[in-house]
Image (cartoon, coloured by chain):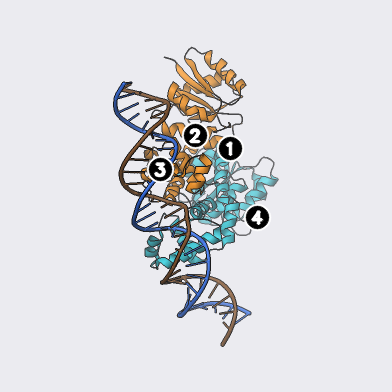
Chain colours: A orange, B cyan, C brown, D blue
Amino acid sequence: MPTTVLLVDDEPLVRAGLRAILEAQPDIEVAGEASDGAAVLPMVRQLRPDVVAMDVRMPLLDGIEATRAVLRTVAEPPKILVVTTFENDEYVYDALQAGADGFLLKRAAPAEIVQAVRMVAAGESLLFPASLRKLAASRGNARAREVMERAALTAREAEVLRLMARGMSNPEIARTLILGTETVKTHVSAVLAKLGARDRTQAVIAAYESGFVVPG
Amino acid sequence: MPTTVLLVDDEPLVRAGLRAILEAQPDIEVAGEASDGAAVLPMVRQLRPDVVAMDVRMPLLDGIEATRAVLRTVAEPPKILVVTTFENDEYVYDALQAGADGFLLKRAAPAEIVQAVRMVAAGESLLFPASLRKLAASRGNARAREVMERAALTAREAEVLRLMARGMSNPEIARTLILGTETVKTHVSAVLAKLGARDRTQAVIAAYESGFVVPG
DNA sequence: GGGGCCCTCCCCCACGTGGGGGAGGCGCCG
DNA sequence: CGGCGCCTCCCCCACGTGGGGGAGGGCCCC
């Protein structure tokens, strides 16, 4: 059975190009397309692709957040290939740290693009040198990260935690997410319970220590 | 042809150690040694090493200034590896921001030191420094750090903030420091006022963002 | 000596926070 | 279809938190 790929990029041109290149391969099949990060999670759930070719800079939800969301909430997540214009794009590193499996240059030759998809699908991290992996690992201590992973926050909870880590109060978070304060409280309580935190401060500390949020 | 390395450290012992470790490798050659930053620039010009292993704290001219000088004035600059005793040395981040390509712990195993030299020489620094500089920048976070410096916390206040950043409640801090809860509250209020934080969570965030406390 | 700063502790009070429990609507999946 | 998890919202209640003000003792330095 062929490798299925979900294309995520806000430019139709890029999607069309990727589709043309990938569909030409007998062993690769484009399962679907999304034009922004927000659409990624539901599509991944529905289509269950093997690989997601994800642009970094996108409206609504960028590739980094989308990557985090997918890896955090999907049981057997697809391999994520970050698509970028410049190889030293600042955001690429964030995406890789968020758990992406490799990156793909837009100006790469078609054969290279195909090869990249085949490689990540096969379980090989692409252009993910030891140094970078080490750097990602150095982010936060292992225990904190394990707690964060084991926590398995839902998308909403993760969103709330991120806002907590920006110093927002419950009413502020509610206004930001267009929610009732009570709803936010529910999510906050869930986050605290899952992280084993006593109060929001401890939760934010866990977020920093685990690398869930990054200083800067 | 072998990778040539220039050793820069004010302690002869360290230089001897690095030389012994590196010379034992067939593909690495120590091109020369310097005992202070001022000697670095002329030696780089003359010897044209591939890598400079540079100590941070040195007399006359420190490693940061020396790094800047080299990168600013040499046409095809060598890769610069910052040598340091402590991995969270304040100056290391400054050096990385000055353009160094990586850092090297003095207590690292010989194999790791050799590996580090090979890696920067091979240009792995293309990935390495960009993300590291981000780390450096995160410590710099200019605004957050400025706030923290401008805050001019007293010794006690800094102590209290550090414990806040470990998730402690006021009573816990009081027990830890053998103080009354009211006293802790006074200090906490002072910290919040000085940092412009509304609550302890925001204060802890400021502590992380400014590098006052470090994740991991 | 006196001023200034730090550390220590106390009062009162408003309020956001967090725990407990409950409930309806929704989409996914067996 | 029926569960199940997620998201949404509501109630009550205990309490830690943070703001306001005040106060005494110790230390350094002008």
Q: Is A25 situated left or right of A192 in this image?
A: right
Task: Tell me which chain the residue with mark 2 is part of.
Answer: A
User: Of marks 3 and 2, which one's residue comes earlier in the chain?
Assistant: 2
Q: CA distance from mark 2 to mark 4?
A: 35 Å
Identify the residue position indicated by label 1 in the image. Answer: A90
* Rendered residue at 50%/53% (across/down): B202
Mark 1, chain letter? A
- In the rendered structure, are the residues bearing label 4 and label 3 in contact, judged by CB atoms less than 8 Å apart? no
Whole-number angstrom distance, CA of label 4 to CA of label 3: 61 Å
Q: Which comes sooner in the sequence, label 3 or label 1?
A: 1
Q: Which residue, given by chain and number where applicable, does mark 2 sit on?
A: A129
Q: Chain of mark 3?
A: A
Say which quarter of the image contains residue A14: top right
Name the residue tied to disc 3.
A186
Q: What residue is rendered at 58% in x and 57% in y?
A: B147
Would you say residue A26 is visible in this rendering? yes
Sequence order check, earlier mark of 1 and 2: 1
- Asked whether A147 or B131 is in front, the reply is A147
